[in-house]
Image: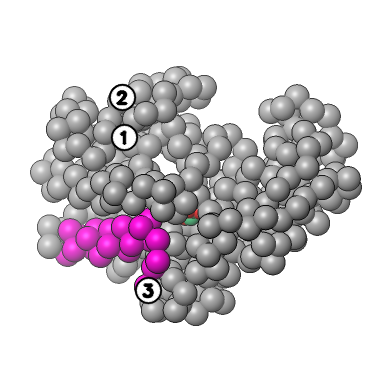
Amino acid sequence: MLTRALVIGATGQIGYELVPALRKLYGVDNVVAGYHSKKPSGVLLEGPVEQVDVSSRESLEAVIKKSDFDEVYNLAALLSAAGEKNPQLAWKVNMIGHYNVLELAREYGFRVFWPSTIAVFGPTTPKYKTPQHTIIEPITMYGITKYAGELLARYYVQKYDLDVRGVRWPGIISSEALPGGGTTDYAVEIFYYAVEGKPYTCYLREDTELPMMYMPDAIKSVIQLMSANKARLKLYVGYNVSAFSFTPRQLVEEIRKYIPGFKVEYKPDFRQAIADSWPKSLDDSVAREEWGWSPDWTFEAMVKDMLVKIARKLGKKLDIEE
Ligand code: SER
């Protein structure tokens, strides 16, 4: 049987790469790229697209009604930094949007993927190898909506027997669409400056260690979790998934192995306090046990691959053996 899927937030950093990955699995015509304010471009236009406002039940239902979707991937969210600039909008998109998807899942019977984040953790959480179950007192609107959303999703799973699944992603590094409004965005931005030969001003202190993951592993986590045997899942949403951790200084040192003259200065802004409230590494043993999670990419391999990809994208020549 063919699976039909809707990806909400398709023009964002993760949606832009999840849509083609799902189209490879389900067929190009069976995966609809849902967008809102940012118009779809590039690979997204190879298949169907629909404008949808997740925070409006009517808008969402109009798209859901058109097609018999088996799965909805709700990636629409304001991230940590954007959420602090407009907490009211973050609540609307992240929380009401999530509620609308769950309510329509209850009525139309589709499965849901909905990601959470390391931003659910706060300053009182143990920083290293942060356990799955621990003190959770987020300080950003983003973290608050995502933790409340985890509880809400699990409620719908228990009460209405819905199939809702999701992970807690760390910062995601990728070469296709740019991230927007996150605290971990520096770790993508920096590659463009390095490849262009421009100096970079980092908004986090050089010793700010954060958990991160390369996009191919992020996509793998979605596909693996969505195809996992339901009988083995206990948590359903909010699985810690981890790959590697690094500081801005370590990232700069790794980039300098290929671009020795790369110049960076550090000017921490409001995002420093957000980063300081998050874990430095995660314990993802529950994801490993329940659905066999393991990442493929190391920090070093990611940096090399990013440089190759960004150089190709910007039409620059770097002396890197592929
Ligand atoms: N990348 C996100 C952010 O920085 C974390 O989930 O807000």
Secondary structure at badge 2 equals strand
Residue at left 63%, top 45%? 188
Report whether 107 appears left or right of 206. left
| Label 2, label 1: how far apart the Cα atoms are | 9 Å
**Disc 2 residue lies near ligand 1 with CB under 8 A:** no
Q: Which residues are magenta?
A: 137-158
Mark number, residue 136: 3
Which amino acid, mark 2?
A: Glu
Report whether 181 appears left or right of 51. right
Within 10 Å of the Cα at label 3, are there few (<14), some (14-19), or many (20+) other Cα atoms?
some
Q: Earlier in the sequence, mark 3 or mark 2?
A: 2
The answer to whether residue 183 of the structure is visible from this angle is yes
Which amino acid, mark 1?
A: Leu
Label 2 near label 3: C-beta < 8 Å?
A: no
The quadrant of the rendering that contains the N terminus is top left
Q: Earlier in the sequence, mark 2 or mark 1?
A: 1
